[in-house]
Amino acid sequence: MSMLADEADLVDLGLRWAPGFSALGPAFFTELQPRPLPDPYWVGVSARVAGDLGLDPSWLQSDEGLAAFVGNSPVAGTRPFASVYSGHQFGVWAGQLGDGRAIFLGETAGGLEVQLKGAGPTPYSRMGDGRAVLRSSIREFLCSEAMHGLGIPTTRALCVTGSDARVRREELETAAVVARVAPSFIRFGHFEHFAANQREDELRALANYVIDRYYPECRVSPRFGGNAYAALLEAVSERTAALVAQWQAVGFCHGVMNTDNMSILGLTIDYGPFQFLDGFDPRHICNHSDTSGRYAFNQQPNVAYWNLFCLAQALLPLIGDQEVAVAALESYKTVFPREFEARMRAKLGLAEAAEGDRALIEGVLKLLAQEKVDYTIFWRRLSHGVASGDVEPVRDLFVDRPGLDAWLQSYAGRRAGTPAADTAARMLRSNPKFVLRNHLGQQAIEAAGQKDFSGVATLLRLLESPFDEHAGRDAFAGFPPDWASTIEISCSS
Ligand code: AMP
Ligand code: MG
């Protein structure tokens, strides 16, 4: 019996696959195969994500694993597809977008969707080439795992594979593919798509799918007179509020909070020009293409709300009543500050809320902003300062010593009665030593361009457990070099 060429290189990952998103039917996606890349090689692998998927990490790094995750060999049991969505980009309705370079392999029986990002053009590529470049793929890979290490909801990254195939951006670069993993990659933009096209049946099917799969409590919620779609909107609002509160507390700037980059599960998704703040500048704009500062660090909470408003608009035909839809968004305004304060309290090592906490938090953020003090280093030094009783290393970060001393005094007063060791232990679990600063990513990227992938592996190890000390790795926890501020990260990826 003769075999089809495709079947000859079919790779069996040993995973069971479920229908998942594809059960929604052809209105939601187009089936297609990834387009092969020549002479692929490994760039980075997360053993943790491999474990979550049920893949043996040592098998994964075989030639077969490489061929499967770069998109060169079809995977047994899968029918790959790209999904369609629309969205608002930089505040403007952009119409149809879709997975222009991400191809779903499918969903595992364990409930994890696997996508290959950069695996070739799709019907939704518009003018794009369907590829992703090595630098942005390394950034997405490392940041996905860094966020997870920080305890922040995110899509995950299984691996990055590369090829010397040329990809044209501002300059010629090389191609890479990120295999990314999440319970769902559904975005606000998926809902906006069917709403804008007045396809209410598909809109309802999508909402029902999301509720049944990910928010079953909305089906039985008594909120809004039993309106499950309003309950869904409220639940998404609350998850989004909690997510953005975590971003603000850790100093993470997403950079492109378009509605097509907003996860219906409240995950951080689509890592592009993101940045962890070096010096604390609330107005920091990390995306070189964002000339108006729409997505500046301190705008993120408002932009998330604006995006939720777009989602509300899209769900309106299902919710059926504008007032109910608006009411379903209300809790964002209480959940965001509540979650933000809780995160900041954790950074301060405070176990319980007390009156005056907000002033204490605002006080320290104001001091940090005044002098653009390094955000991550400040919090880590403060943690050690509480542990040892020696705050000189913290004072060294400031010119305005009297201002800092006054704040330190009120902070000491707030902690009075709690053993410093307990407070410090909490702080060291909330204030990371390692974050993926731009310059660290840049160094790993430059080495990877020379086929030295050890920098990617080292950063992955540190970022997977960013609260640990990692003896001998202090160079990765220091101040950014002067050249870090000259790194320009744009939407180009
Ligand atoms: P992003 O800004 O990366 O979230 O992308 C916005 C939209 O453009 C999405 O629909 C992407 O799939 C699509 N896109 C971005 N880059 C490319 C590319 N190189 N080829 C095809 N589509 C792309
Ligand atoms: Mg996107």
Image (tube, rainbow, N blue to C red):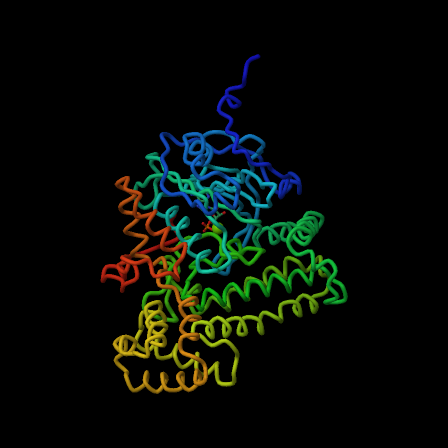
Question: How many numbered marks does the figure carry?
Answer: 0
Residue that appears at 36% across and 35% down: 41
In front: 423, or 229? 423
Q: Front-most of 365 and 89?
A: 365
Residue 322 pos. (x, y %): 69, 66
| As drawn, 285 above or below 354 | above
Q: Decide if residue 469 is on the left or right side of residue 99.
A: left
The x, y position of residue 11, in whole percent, is 50, 29
The residue sitting at the right extreme is 225
Q: Where 294 sits versus 2, above or below? A: below
The quadrant in which the N terminus is found is top right
- Residue drawn at the location 71% of the way across and 57% of the way down: 318
Residue 39: % across, % down: 36, 30
State the residue at coordinates (37%, 38%): 42
**Which of the two residues, 32 or 155, is positioned nearer the viewer here?**
155
- Quadrant housing residue 418: bottom left
Q: Is residue 78 left or right of residue 168?
A: right
